Image (tube, helix red, strand yellow):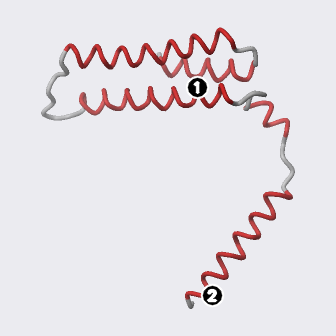
């Protein structure tokens, strides 16, 4: 296949997909079920979840090394402070959250946190 053929094929598929996305009916029932009315708080929660995941992966990567060096007391305190900071964000978010869908996501985050 020539390069121009590949390019035109990709262009037509992309155009077709874009048209289908605009024609595809949105499912408001599913959206209401999983995404709160104001998704900004959900995005903040997801950001905290990614940060906690990153911290936990750093902890596990040190623990899984064959010739690991033990973390210093200050390193452990820093990691704990970071984790507690994200839990404080969750507490602040919980204090102002009124959307039941957002509350559901916060419960999932809390389970992950424990």
Q: Is residue 7 left or right of residue 114?
A: right
Residue at the (12%, 33%) spot, across then down:
67
Q: Is residue 76 left or right of residue 15?
A: left
Q: Is residue 69 left or right of residue 27?
A: left
Residue sitting nearer the eye, 37 or 100: 37
Q: Dot 1 surroundings within 10 Å: few (below 14), some, or many (20 or more)?
A: many
Inter-mark Cα distance, 2 to 1: 45 Å
Which residue lies under the disc numbered 2? 5
Which residue lies under the disc numbered 1? 45
* Image quarter in which the N terminus is found: bottom right
Residue 42 drawn above or below residue 1:
above
Q: How far across and how far down the image is residue 100, in percent?
A: 75, 18
Residue 6 drawn above or below residue 49:
below
Q: How far across and how far down the image is residue 2, in percent?
A: 56, 91
Residue at the (84%, 46%) spot, across then down:
26
Q: Is residue 19 left or right of residue 4?
A: right
Q: How far across and how far down the image is residue 3, in percent?
A: 55, 87
Residue sitting nearer the eye, 26 or 44: 44
Residue 71 sits in quarter: top left
- Mark 2 in CB contact with mark 1 (< 8 angstroms): no
Q: How far across and how far down the image is residue 90, in percent?
A: 56, 16
Q: Reading the chain from its start, which is encountered first: label 2 or label 1?
A: 2
Residue 46 sits in quarter: top right
Element assignment for label 1: helix
Q: How many marks?
A: 2
Q: Which mark is residue 107?
A: none
Q: Dot 2 surroundings within 10 Å: few (below 14), some, or many (20 or more)?
A: few
Residue at the (36%, 32%) spot, across then down:
57
């Amino acid at each position: 296949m020539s390069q121009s053929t590949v390019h035109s094929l990709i262009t037509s598929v992309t155009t077709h997909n874009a048209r289908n996305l605009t024609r595809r009916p949105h499912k408001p029932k599913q959206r209401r079920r999983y995404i709160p009315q104001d998704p900004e708080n959900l995005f903040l929660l997801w950001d905290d979840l990614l940060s906690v995941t990153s911290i936990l992966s750093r902890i596990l990567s040190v623990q899984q090394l064959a010739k690991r060096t033990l973390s210093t007391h200050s390193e452990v305190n820093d990691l704990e402070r970071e984790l507690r900071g994200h839990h404080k964000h969750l507490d602040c978010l919980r204090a102002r959250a009124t959307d039941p869908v957002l509350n559901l996501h916060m419960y999932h985050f809390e389970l992950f946190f424990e």
